[in-house]
Amino acid sequence: MKKKSAIQVEIPLTVPFHDLDPLQVVWHGNYLKYFDMARFALLKSRAVDLYAYSRKHRIIFPVTRSSTKYIVPLRYQDEFICSAAVTEAKYKIVMDFEIRLAGNSTVCAKGKSEQVAVKMPDMELLFEIPLDIRQALGVD
């Protein structure tokens, strides 16, 4: 990962059969699923539940941008580590992701996502992430 963050998490995962494509490698869309699993593990580690927050405050946090760089394909039963790190959380929540093999640390994929805060029901874009979320993510 390019930027190191004090707020980061790593989760161990294993490639299940149903994540493979006809070429017997992980289908490209599943990398976003792995990134999401790390994102929610990171948020949970900071006691942030975006679903409960949206119900209580009527603010949602849609992903507005994501990117993935595929480097080495994952295969059936590969054990890997997916890491997520907060790199920004003032105006939008930006996270960097990295997937690497557990055995030898080979980097398989890198990614990035951006989320914004939107007030419901009017779909009003907020120009800052709410203070309590920023503080939980280490940005105030």
Image (spheres, helix red, strand yellow):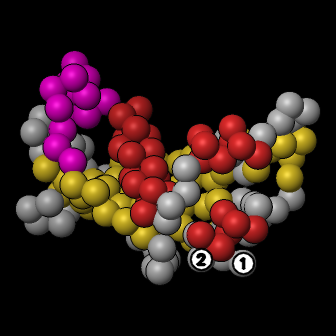
Residue 51 pos. (x, y %): 59, 40
The reply to whether residue 65 is in sight is no
Residue 123 pos. (x, y %): 86, 35
Task: Say whether residue 14 is magenta.
Answer: yes
Residue 29 pos. (x, y %): 41, 32
Looking at the image, is 55 positioned above or below residue 6? above
Residue 28 pos. (x, y %): 37, 34
Q: Residue furthest top?
A: 22
Residue type beneath disc 2: Gly
**Residue at horizontal 36 percent and vertical 34 percent from the top:** 30
With 61 as the anchor, is 26 left or right in this view?
left
Q: Secondary structure at mark 2?
A: loop
**Residue at horizontal 45 percent and vertical 56 percent from the top:** 44
* Frontmost residue, 69 versus 140: 140
**Residue at horizontal 42 percent and vertical 63 percent from the top:** 45
Q: Secondary structure at mark 1?
A: loop
* Frontmost residue, 116 versus 57: 57
With 133 as the anchor, is 70 left or right in this view?
left
**Residue at horizontal 39 percent and vertical 46 percent from the top:** 37
Magenta portion: prevailing SS class: loop
Q: Residue furthest front?
A: 56
Q: Which residues are magenta?
A: 13-28
With 100 as the anchor, is 77 left or right in this view?
left
**Circle 2 residue:** 138
Residue type beneath disc 1: Asp
**Circle 1 residue:** 140
- Which circle marks residue 106 in the picture? none
Q: Residues within 10 Å of mark 1 (few under 14, many from 20)?
A: few
Image quadrant holding the C terminus, namely bottom right
Q: CA distance from mark 2 to mark 1?
A: 7 Å
Task: Say whether residue 121 is magenta.
Answer: no
Image quadrant holding the N terminus, namely bottom left
